[in-house]
Structures are given as C-alpha cells and as structure tokens.
Image (cartoon, helix red, strand yellow):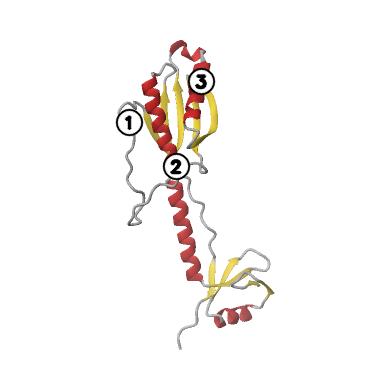
Amino acid sequence: MRLISQDGQQLGIVPVPDALRMAQESDLDLVEVAPLANPPVCRIMDYRKWQYEEKQRAKESRKKASNVSVKEMKYRPKIGTGDFDTKTRKVAEFLTEGHKVKVTIMFRGREVFHPELGAKILDHIADDVAPVGKVESQGRLDGRNMTMVLAPDRKKVPSPPRRRDGRGEAPVDAPTTSQVTSETETSQAEEAAPAPAATEVLASEPPAS
C-alpha cells in the first residue's frame, strides 16, 4: 500500500504489516482513504478526531447554507414617495442583516410599454442602498415584471452588535413596516456537500494490556 503519515508526508510503498506497526507505535489508526487506487492509499491518523472534525465542518456548512435567504420587495411604477422611502428602508435593512433582496417592479396594463419607468426606480433604489449593498443582477423584464437582485456588500455592511453575554445579536429597533404591502421570503438552502469520508479503519489503538 501507499502510506501517508499523520502530518501528510508521503512514505511511499509500505507493506501492510509495517504500516500497521507504525500506526500502533504512534498510538494512532491506519485508515484506507483511497481503496480504488493502485496501490491502495492509507493514512496514519486519529480516526475519532478526524470524524469529529468532519462532523463539525459539515454542521457549520449546513448552518451557513440555511441562513442564506432571498427577500423580495415589490414596487409599482407610479409608487408614491412615502411608500418608496418605506420600502427602500426595509430593503436596506435586509441587506444589513446579510440577506439578498429581489426587487420587483410590477407593471399593469399599458405600463409595460414604458420599461424606462421601472428602470428609473431600480436605479434610484440601487443608489439609495449603495452604502450597504450592491447590484448582483441588473434589472431585466420578465413578462409584466422587471426584476433586479441586490446583495450585501460585505466590505460595507458592519458586523451586527453582540450581546454582552455572548449569546448572539443584540436587539435593535427596526424601522416601521406598516406601509410595506408586499414582501415575501424564499429560502435558498443549498445542500452542504458531504465531506469525503475514510472507507475503512484498518487498525485502531492497541488494547490496554
């Protein structure tokens, strides 16, 4: 078999008995990591520690994936100044919290023949939220709607305040949303890619004498 040491050093082709002896002398395990290779590849490692670290990495990946979401805010081409300001403040709040935001301009009737009205609103929104976000997908027509996707700008968005007891984010006063008439949330959780797992433990720690 081809043997890899605990620190990743290539030890070359080593007979199985010698590899087992080396693992036992180090009080570690001999794990087959590439059984289909020719010759098979084994590594000397602490298998329980490796399993624990893989589980922690997978857990962290799932946590990050589940926190990724896209909010949606809808506007009309003839939206009033008050409604526009309220909705745009909410968009900025979503971006500050780390969410992406899909902005939708809804056309009715002959409004669809004037896409420049929707483009003007989208440009205005992008300018207003520029301190905390950036345009990820430029505005485009989709049937009777025009959409644009905004994403948080990690270089500009400050980290959320922490509680003094270290248990997450401190409560903040959110701007009023009583005039926000349409907002939807669509979860986009990507399945965390499974970490490569060792296929077989060839040798464990020697039993206590």
Which residue in the protein does label 1 denote?
A: 177
Image quadrant occupied by the N terminus: bottom right
Could you tell me the amino acid type at mark 3? Lys
Cα distance in 3D space between marks 2 and 3: 25 Å
Q: Is residue 152 above or below residue 31?
A: above
In percent of the image, x 63 and y 81: which residue is there? 18
Q: Position of residue 70 (x, y in %)?
A: 44, 37
Q: Is residue 109 above or below residue 70?
A: above
Find numbered disc 3 in the image and state the secondary structure of the residue it sits on: helix
Asked which quadrant contains residue 185, the reply is top left
Depth check, front residue: 64 or 130 = 130
In percent of the image, x 47 and y 56: which residue is there? 58
In percent of the image, x 44 and y 38: which residue is there? 95
Could you tell me the amino acid type at mark 2? Gly
Asked which quadrant contains residue 196, the reply is bottom right
Which residue in the protein does label 2 denote?
A: 98
- Counting labels gives 3
Q: Position of residue 136 (x, y in %)?
A: 54, 34
